[in-house]
């Protein structure tokens, strides 16, 4: 199986961060984990400490680990389900997020 990372960067609408986070944590992560090949999910929030000065385009990151021999099946299923009862989308999220699929080009290195 080939390993991939589906990386999604988004923002909540102004004043609706709690609703956005509730949807993501209570609904959306589980929905994405039902996609073929998706084996793990994690959300991250932008730290207050950054190397570069603001503005920053996105404040939230979701990383999904995918193991599959055909990533196109995962992508096509995501496209087909997004915004349907199988994968509802919140109206508390800003339009214009970014979604990318990455694959490794080196072995994973560790310190030490």
Image (cartoon, rainbow, N blue to C red):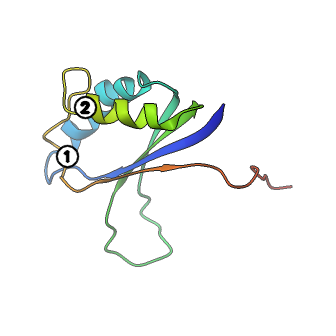
Residue 21 lies, with reference to residue 98, above or below; the image says above
- Out of 13 and 2, give the one closest to the viewer: 2
Residue extending furthest toward the right: 112
- Badge 1: residue crowd in 10 Å (few <14, some 14–19, many ≥20): many
Q: Label 2 to label 1, Cα distance in Å?
A: 10 Å
Q: 85 left or right of 47?
A: left
Query: SS at mark 1?
Result: loop
Q: What label sits on residue 23 in the rendered view?
A: 2
Q: Which residue was labeled with disc 1? A: 93
- Spot occupied by residue 88 in the image (x, y as percentages of width and height): 20, 28
Residue 35 lies, with reference to residue 93, above or below; the image says above
Which residue is at a point 34% across and 24% down the rendered structure image?
31
- Spot occupied by residue 108 in the image (x, y as percentages of width and height): 74, 49
Mark before the other along the chain sequence, 2 or 1: 2
Which residue is at a point 23% across and 40% down the rendered structure image?
20
- Badge 2: residue crowd in 10 Å (few <14, some 14–19, many ≥20): some
Q: Quadrant of the N terminus?
A: top right
Which residue is at a point 68% across and 55% down the rendered structure image?
105
> Is the C-beta separation of discs 2 and 1 under 8 Å?
yes
Q: Quadrant of the C terminus?
A: bottom right
Q: 49 left or right of 3?
A: left
Query: SS at mark 2?
Result: helix
Q: Which image quarter: residue 54?
A: bottom left
Q: How many marks?
A: 2
């Amino acid at each position: 199986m080939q390993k991939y990372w589906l990386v999604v960067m988004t923002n909540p609408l102004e004043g609706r961060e709690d609703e956005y986070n509730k949807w993501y944590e209570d609904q959306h992560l589980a929905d994405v984990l039902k996609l073929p090949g998706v084996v793990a999910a994690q959300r991250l929030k932008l730290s207050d400490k950054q190397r570069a000065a603001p503005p920053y385009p996105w404040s939230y990151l979701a990383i999904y680990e995918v193991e599959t021999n055909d990533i196109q099946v995962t992508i096509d299923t995501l496209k087909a389900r997004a915004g349907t009862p199988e994968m509802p989308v919140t109206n508390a999220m800003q339009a214009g997020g970014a979604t990318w699929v990455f694959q490794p080009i080196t072995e994973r290195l560790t310190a030490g």
